[in-house]
Image: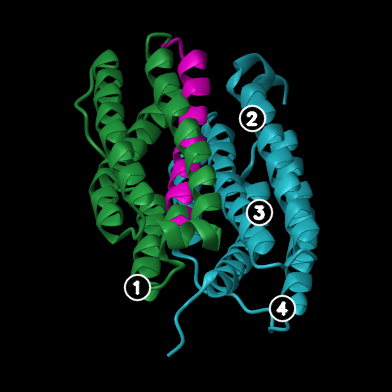
Chain colours: A green, B cyan
Amino acid sequence: MAEKTLNDLFVDTLKDIYFAEKQILKALPKMARAAQSEEGAAGFLIHRDETLAQIKRLEQVFELIAKPARGKTCEAIQGIIAEGEEIMEDYKGSAALDAGLISSAQAVEHYEIARYGTLISWAEHIGLEDAVPLLEANLAEEVATDAKLTKLAEAVANPKNAVSA
Amino acid sequence: MAEKTLNDLFVDTLKDIYFAEKQILKALPKMARAAQSEEGAAGFLIHRDETLAQIKRLEQVFELIAKPARGKTCEAIQGIIAEGEEIMEDYKGSAALDAGLISSAQAVEHYEIARYGTLISWAEHIGLEDAVPLLEANLAEEVATDAKLTKLAEAVANPKNAVSA
């Protein structure tokens, strides 16, 4: 058996984030339905559309390496999403629900930020230059979403705003 | 039953990150033993010592809210660590092992960055000002560790450096 290389790591991690993005795509509408504030719900739906575009970019990366777009179970995202579902259950109907949902979404964003950062670095090292702008586009969106969520978190944690929502 | 509040979310998330830090404390020596480069091994051990100090700071936050320091199972960190263990197994003995270990460590750091960011914001909103510098100290260390790991990743992904390690 040939020794494993950075190329293998790249493919394994691409499959991992592809699986993760598809799970996130399913989770976001649930979070939007659960959200109490209109801003929160709208934010999750906008990110759902972004996630669809991100999945398409990942499929372009699979094409570049001439491999079928296929996910690989990502226990990390499963755990992060499970914690979000627990918050939805435990905080249902409470004023703190949206703050909890936003915190879960930020844990998701940070997982993606870590993975895209790694994939970009590896793509450069293995000479897969054409993949870099695709992965960078996804990373930039995740960073922007995290920043938007931080602002939204401030708004919903402020009781004055929460009442007016 | 009283309606749940941001205070409850703060306590739940504090328990979540306390559990997570303790799991990380156990995982880091395993990662150090698995690492092929001396730099990688040393990096994981330094971060183990930092993690010990971070756990002490979290215990101070529990004292501030007059609650026993107790963790709550964090499925997110369990998933992230499980993926790291899978890499240790799959890439054992290969030149790509350290790159994989570092990527796992960065996923861990980003989970912590998300959680500390949220806890700091909530501590400010619930008037727990004394907790803020403790949580900010932990956040600053995680951000610095993530930056160090990015540099280390560049070094180990470069075959020239990998040979000299």
Does the segment drawn in magenta span residue A107?
A: yes
SS category of the residue bearing label 2: helix
Tell me which amino acid carries mark 1: Gly
Could you tell me which residue is drawn at 31 percent across and 50 percent down? Answer: A41
Residue hosting label 3: B28
Residue hosting label 2: B150
Magenta region: A103-128
**Discs 1 and 2 lie in a common subunit:** no
**What number is the disc on residue A93?**
1
Tell me which amino acid carries mark 3: Leu
Q: Residue B150 or A52: which is nearer the viewer?
A: A52
**Left or right side of A61 for B58:** right
What's the distance in space between the residues labelled 1 and 4, CA to CA?
A: 25 Å
Q: Residue furthest left?
A: A68
What's the distance in space between the residues labelled 4 and 3, CA to CA?
A: 29 Å
Using a 10 Å C-alpha cutoff, classify the residue at mark 2 as few (fewer than 14 neighbours), some (14 to 19) or many (20 or more): some
Q: Position of residue A69 (x, y in %)?
A: 21, 29
Tell me which amino acid carries mark 4: Ile
The answer to whether marks 1 and 2 mark residues whose Cβ atoms lie closer than 8 Å is no
Q: Residue B153 or B85: which is nearer the viewer?
A: B153
